């Protein structure tokens, strides 16, 4: 008789009315969710320890997996904005028990964090003096690089060329927001010009030492399509 009881319960679940709010949520496509998050969440309602953090939380989960696996001695973050993600990485390194974050940003107007593991370098990531200082901070250490500065193809490609040599074998150069190349201009995500994805494709032709780690996109809702570049 147990199978009869189980069957009845299954039928009841199937016909139980779902609240309209959740019916609408569950009917969203992946595209709908990405636009919703970009339009309504990321700029005003996403934070780490109270600090605005312009990130997709599913990508942030993948970042902690990578940090745990790679255990970099230096994380170079190009583009920090308010500093929420910078603090997030510093806290991950606290948990790992080693490492520093080198934050590179041209504008510190909204940046309002401090942490003993964070070194802030203010300036254009393309400035030779900034590049040289970052190189000194990374010398002789294992390095992971995040690019979340300007998202036009030219700047992303410039950062890839300037900082990819710092990435140690087995570690990553993560290019954020390549999702913009997969959306149309005017829908809150798309750009009118080529962005990070175009830069990634050109960079990979130039650099056979890097490969796309597609398994880092397994949660589907990523801002970084083809943007998890592992150095082999």
Image (cartoon, rainbow, N blue to C red):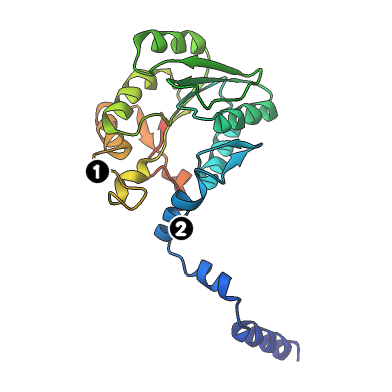
Q: Is residue 145 above or below residue 40?
A: above
Answer with mark 1 or mark 2, whichever residue precedes in sequence: 2
Residue 142 pos. (x, y %): 52, 19
Return the residue nearer the eye: 175 or 164. 175
Number of other residues with Cα within 10 Å of mark 2, as a class: few under 14, some 14 to 19, many 20 or more: some
Identify which residue is drawn at 41% across, 11% down. 130
Q: Left or right: where does residue 196 sit relative to residue 37?
A: left
Percent of width and height locating residue 7: 66, 87
The quadrant in which the N terminus is found is bottom right
Say which element carries label 2: helix
Which quarter of the picture shows residue 49?
top right
Q: Residue at x 35, y 13 (%)?
A: 127
Quadrant for residue 89, please give it.
top right
Is 90 placed left or right of 35 in the picture?
right
Image height check: is 108 above or below 58? above
The label on residue 172 is none
Q: Residues within 10 Å of mark 1 (few under 14, many from 20)?
A: few
Is residue 95 something one can see in this rendering? yes
Residue where numbered disc 2 is placed: 33
């Amino acid at each position: 008789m147990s199978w009869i009881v189980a069957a009845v319960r299954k039928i009841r679940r199937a016909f139980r009315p779902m609240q309209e709010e959740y019916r609408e949520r569950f009917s969203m496509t992946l595209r709908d969710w990405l636009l919703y998050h970009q339009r309504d969440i990321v700029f005003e309602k996403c934070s780490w320890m109270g600090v605005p953090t312009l990130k997709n939380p599913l990508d942030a989960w993948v970042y902690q997996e990578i940090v745990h696996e790679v255990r970099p001695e230096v994380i170079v973050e190009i583009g920090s904005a308010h500093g929420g993600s910078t603090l997030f990485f510093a806290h991950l390194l606290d948990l790992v028990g080693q490492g520093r974050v080198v934050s590179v940003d041209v504008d510190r107007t909204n940046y309002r964090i401090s942490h003993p593991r964070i070194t802030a370098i203010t300036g254009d990531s393309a400035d030779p003096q900034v590049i040289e200082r970052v190189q000194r901070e990374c010398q002789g250490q294992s390095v992971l690089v995040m690019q979340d500065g300007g998202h036009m193809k030219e700047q992303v490609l410039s950062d890839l060329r300037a900082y990819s040599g710092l990435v140690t074998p087995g570690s990553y150069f993560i290019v954020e927001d390549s999702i913009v190349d997969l959306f149309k201009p005017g829908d809150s995500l798309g750009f009118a010009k080529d962005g990070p994805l175009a830069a990634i494709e050109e960079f990979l032709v130039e650099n056979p030492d890097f490969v796309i780690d597609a398994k880092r996109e397994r949660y589907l809702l990523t801002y970084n399509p083809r943007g998890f570049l592992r150095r082999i």
